[in-house]
Image (cartoon, helix red, strand yellow):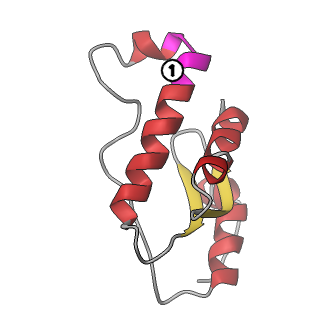
Amino acid sequence: MGKYLKRKVLQVKRFHPEIDIIKVNTNIDHMHIMVSIPPKMSVSSVVRLIKTNTGKAMRKRFPFLDKVYWGIEGIWSIGYFVSTVGISEETIQKYIEMQGREDSGQAQLEL
């Protein structure tokens, strides 16, 4: 499912060329995405766009999700975390690459 989800997130650029998906990494229960958006777009609108499109695609591709999320409109939680300043792009990319190992305590990443 993770590979499919990653592919769907990367396809957002095809329909919204102004959104630049720089890096994506999925984990068992969350994902990290490095995105560059134009000033005319709000962060919340881009997150909503990504969640809506990937959620619909995931339900279509994996029908069992309709049973898991029965009575719930989407598969995503309502929250998200955004960091816009204070960390270099290189550090963010390393963090996204190392996400799975870091979450399981296998990586030492200095922020």
x, y percent for residue 38: 49, 74
* In the image, residue 96 above or below residue 57: below
Count of numbered marks: 1
In this picture, residue 19 sits left or right of residue 3:
left
Toward the left, the furthest residue is 71
Q: Which residue is drawn at 64% across and 59% down?
A: 99
Mark 1, residue position? 59
Magenta stretch, overall SS: helix
> What SS does tag 1 mark?
helix
Which image quarter is the N terminus in? top right
Decide: is 93 above or below 33.
below
Q: Can residue 109 be seen in this view?
A: yes
Q: Which of the two residues, 54 or 16, is positioned nearer the viewer here?
A: 16
Residue located 48% across and 27% down the image: 56
- Asked if 97 appears above or below 4 in the picture, the reply is below
Judged left or right of residue 35, residue 91 is right
Question: In this picture, which residue range is highlighted in magenta?
Answer: 58-64
Instruction: Kindly identify the amino acid type of the residue bearing the numbered disc 1.
Output: Arg
Q: Residue at x 39, y 65 (%)?
A: 43
Mark 1: few/some/many CA within 10 Å (<14, 14-19, 20+): some
Residue 109's spot in the image, x, y percent?
Answer: 66, 76
